[in-house]
Each structure stands twice: as C-alpha cells, then as structure tokens.
Image: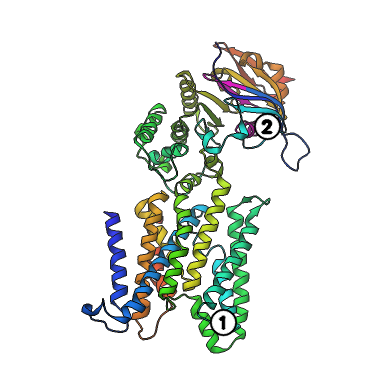
Amino acid sequence: MKWLGLALAAVVAFGLAVVLGPAHVPLSDLATSDIVRSLRLPRAILAFLVGGALALSGASLQALVRNPLADPFLLGLSGGAGLGAVLAIALHLAGPWALPLAAFAGALAAMALVYRLGLVGGAELDPRVLILAGVVVGAFASAVTTAIVSLSEATELRNAFLWLWGGLSGASWDTVLVACVYFPIPVAVLVAAARPLDVLALGEEPARHLGTDVEPLKRRVYVAASLLTAAAVAVSGVIGFVGLVVPHAMRALWGHRHRPLFPAAFLGGGALLAFSDTVARTVVAPRELPVGIVTALVGVPVFAFLLRKWTAS
Amino acid sequence: MDRELILDVRGAAYRYPGTAEDAIAEVSLAVRVGEFHAVLGPNGSGKTTLVRVALGLVEPRSGTCEILRRPATTWSRRELARVVGVVTQREDNLFPQRVRESVLLGRYPHLSLWGRERPEDHAAVTRALERCDTLSLADRWLWTLSGGEYQRVRLARALAQEPRLLVLDEPTASLDVRHEMELFELVRGLVDQGGLAAIVITHHVNLAARFADRVLLLSGGRTAAGGAPADVLTRETVERVFAWPVAIEPFEGCPQMIPLRRKEAT
C-alpha cells in the first residue's frame, strides 16, 4: 500500500514534469512534440535521478555519521563544488562541460580533504571528526567562493549565485546518459551496505561483534555517498533539503531498516525533485526559480511538521 | 569428561600502542562447553583488554589465543559472530526499533549479502526470545523497556547468533537486585542447557562466587588467581587485589565477600 502510494507519487510527479511547462503542448501532441522530447523529458529524467541520488546519499550519511540530521552537503561537498563552479565562471572557462566538471572536481577535492581529516590515527574514520572536518572545509570553501563572487562583475555574480541554488536547466540527453552510466555503481555500493548499516546503528563495537567489518564499511559508504552527491552537484548545483527531508519522511513511513528505506528514499527523492523542478520552471514562466528555493519552500514546512510530530510524542 | 575447548588463551600479553606497560601479561583462560566463567578485578585491571585479545580484535604481543583451536586473529568478524555472541557494556539506539527487529540483527552473520531473512532466521529469533523470557516483549519499542528487560533482549540478540560462547561485559551494571539475579540465573540456565559456554565480566564478587564454575581474578593486568570460586576468593587474595579489607563467609558452599568498614579493620 505504502509502496503503491509512493510509486503513484513518482509517476504523477514525472508525468506533470513532462506535461507542464511554459510552452503549452496539447496532450495529443506529447509524443511528437520537440519540446517534450528534447527538453522536458531529459530534464524530468535528470531531476528524478538527481533527487533520488541526493535522498539515497542523505539516508546513508545519516547512518554513517550516526546523526539523523545529516544531509548530503553536511560533509563540505557543496562548498567544494560551489568553489569549483565559481572559479570556472570567474576564469571564463568555456564549453558546456566546463562548469559541471569544475564543480565535480571541487566536490572531489573537498571529499578527499574531509576524508583525510576524518581519519583518526591514520586508519579509523571517526564520524564526529568527519562532521567537524566537513563543516570547516565547507566554511572555508564558502568564504573563498564569497570572496570571488564579491570581486566579480554583476552578471557573473548572478550566474554564480543562481548556480549555487541549483537548477536543472542544463539538462540534456547527454547529461542523462552521463548520470545513467555513473550513478549505478555508487548506488549499488550503498544498497549492498543497507543491512550492515542497520547493524552499525547499534554502535561500532556491537556491530563488530555482530560480524561487520566496520572500518571498510564506513569508508565504502562515505566514498559512495560522496561520489553520488558530487555528481548530482555537478549536473544540477546545490539542491538542498531533498537529502534531509525525504529520508526522514521515508523513515517515518518505512521505519529505520535500510533495506526498504533506500529504494523508498530514492523514489521519494526523485518524485520531490521532479515535482519541485516543474514548479520552479512554471510559476514565474518564462523565467525560472532556482529549484533549491522550491525544495526549501516545500521541504522546510514538511520538515517543521515532522519535527512537531516527533517532539509531541 | 573432556568437553570441547572453545576458547584457549595462553600466557597472552598485550600492550596498547604508545604505552610503556602491558595492559595484560601472562594471562591464561581456557573455556569449555558447559562452563560459566567470571572475570573479576578492579577497574583498569585488564578485563576488557583480555576480551579484546580473546576475540581477536587485537593480536597478543606474546602468548597465543585460539577459538575452536584456530588463532583468534585469523577469524573474520563474520565467521566469529557465528561462534561468539557478545553483550557489550553500551550500545546506541540511533533509530527507534522494536524488540523483534533488534533481535533479528543477531542473524546478520548468517545472512548472505543480498538474501532475505529465511524462515529459519525468524525461528532462531523466536527461540532466542523464548529462552530469554522476552517473547511477550517482541512487539514493544526498545525505548519502552526497563533496564532489566533491555539487557534480556540484548542477550536474546546474542543468542540469535546461535553462538557457542557468550561474552557479557558487566551485564548487570545498573540493574536492581531482582533483575541482576534474573540475568545471572538466565545465563546459568543457558549454560546448563548445554552446547554453550559463558564468560561474564563483572564487579559482583558474590554473584560470581555463586554462579560461576570458574573465576579469573585480574590485578594490574596479571592473573592474581584463577580456578574454582572457593580457591580464588580467599580473604588474603581479595584484600590484596581490591586493596580493601574484607571478610569472607561461606554461604551455601560459596565464599561470600563482606567489605569491612575502616574502623572494624584496625
């Protein structure tokens, strides 16, 4: 029943993303319309994949850092990606892939730095240190980003600022293809880690005694979740709240076992982002809102509601 | 009667990296099926280190440690979890869980990477819940349990692993008399039902004396005494190890320790 509802939500969100848009396309022309085929369809697919990736990444990081408030950008990736992107804009790097590649490189650099700082005694990944490292690396990258933005021209500044709030306007069949090739490996790694993460929720020592190789598990999950987030950021900028709100909503519905939680989070994240993107490009058409603003506007009330519900019981 | 040897620690020593002294040295512990062992000793005497060495989490500096006649450090965590169930001092409840769900985690070392839980896994969970008298709690949330119920549930999870050896690290640390006694009775019962041995690390000298077959008394990382409770828990030894004057009185054939007030001792 829950699965049916979620599947329905995903289908509806995806359907709306294809049907609605600034240009009016009659339902009868959907299959033949150029706008649908070359613009809306790849964009809807990309929104779905990115939303799913962010929600999955968030759900697994919550288990890894043992903090229910973790989200994919907690560990400094958004700061690194933002710095990479803004650098690319400031240096006038040309080419359709310059921005995503620069953002991806920035995210990877942040990930490597945070990982190195998070290793205690050169071997153990300490979640608490990892969070601290993520926060300081992210803050440093944001400071540098802001410095660059404040020194640059007005139009550039607007571009950089909009990029930081996320958007899927760069979607094309090429980006969909890249996502389809890239996402399955980290997704598979995380799904395979679902059950060990259930055990890890008891703590590292009990998890070890239940047969988990804790250190390799933490490393795998950290790297896979980060790679997923880095790619999502590269194609769509920093889209907040999907990775925090969706896992929580799914935890409320499916409980905390990661086996059902992960696929549910992926579907839910995909549905939310596909829907949010439809809103972002239709409410102020022909202009577009950064989708991160829409996910925040949708996500914050939902999260506030959930928070009230938990604290009440 | 030569019962199966499950754990065999011989003259083990271990020193934590960066420290100048051995945390344990020359410690031996042989555990056979059907035996209840108690490990006693003041804080910092090496009880937890001994468990870490015994379970292959660290390699002894000298001496050997074997589980089922195989060096402890050569077991994978997963293989070992099918043989040894551990109830640690602490655990987290990051996300709310129901009792049955939590006990099902004990089946983790028996499950394949992608496979679902099989009927035999659920049967093992029900059996473990039954043996720990927690079947009626199966659908409760963990956070609604009392301290004593929670410890029994954790023991059930360890039993769901279907181990040959149970290791309990201060299982009754914050329990009242009734729950403390219930837990010791429960572990004693499990061991007596056969197929199983237990090691209990505890500060309760008197409970150890009444429930355990053998007692290992550690002091400063070394064996102060080991053997049957009546041989180990003598006044001289206990006073020396715990640095406090005591009287030892027999009760139902077991030595019982009564700590003395300072005035009485002089």
- Please name the colour scheme applied to the rendered image: rainbow
Quarter occupied by the C terminus of chain B: top right
Which of the numbered marks, if any, corresponds to residue B254?
none
User: Disc 2 and disc 1: Cα gap in Å?
Assistant: 60 Å
Residue position for label 1: A89
Q: Give the image location of residue B161, x and y in percent.
A: 46, 33
- Residue at mark 1: chain: A
Q: Quadrant of residue A10?
A: bottom left
Q: Quadrant of residue B38?
A: top right
Q: Is residue B53 magenta?
A: yes
Q: Give the image location of residue B34, x and y in percent.
A: 51, 18
- Residue at the spot x=53%, y=88% of the render? A155
Residue A75 visible somewhere in the drawing: yes
Q: Give the image location of residue B190, x and y in percent.
A: 46, 23
Label 1 residue SS? helix
Q: From the viewer's perspective, tell me whether residue A107 is left or right of residue B41.
A: left
Nearest to the observer: residue B46 or residue B54: B54
Magenta highlight range:
B30-55
Q: Amino acid at mark 1?
A: Ile
Nearest to the observer: residue A287 or residue B78: B78
Within 10 Å of disc 2 (Cα), the crowding (few <14, some 14-19, many 20+) is: many
Q: Give the image location of residue A305, x and y in percent.
A: 37, 63
Quarter occupied by the N terminus of chain B: top right
- Residue at the spot x=63%, y=63% of the render? A113
Q: Is residue A15 magenta?
A: no
Residue position for label 2: B46
Classify A135 as above or below B158: below
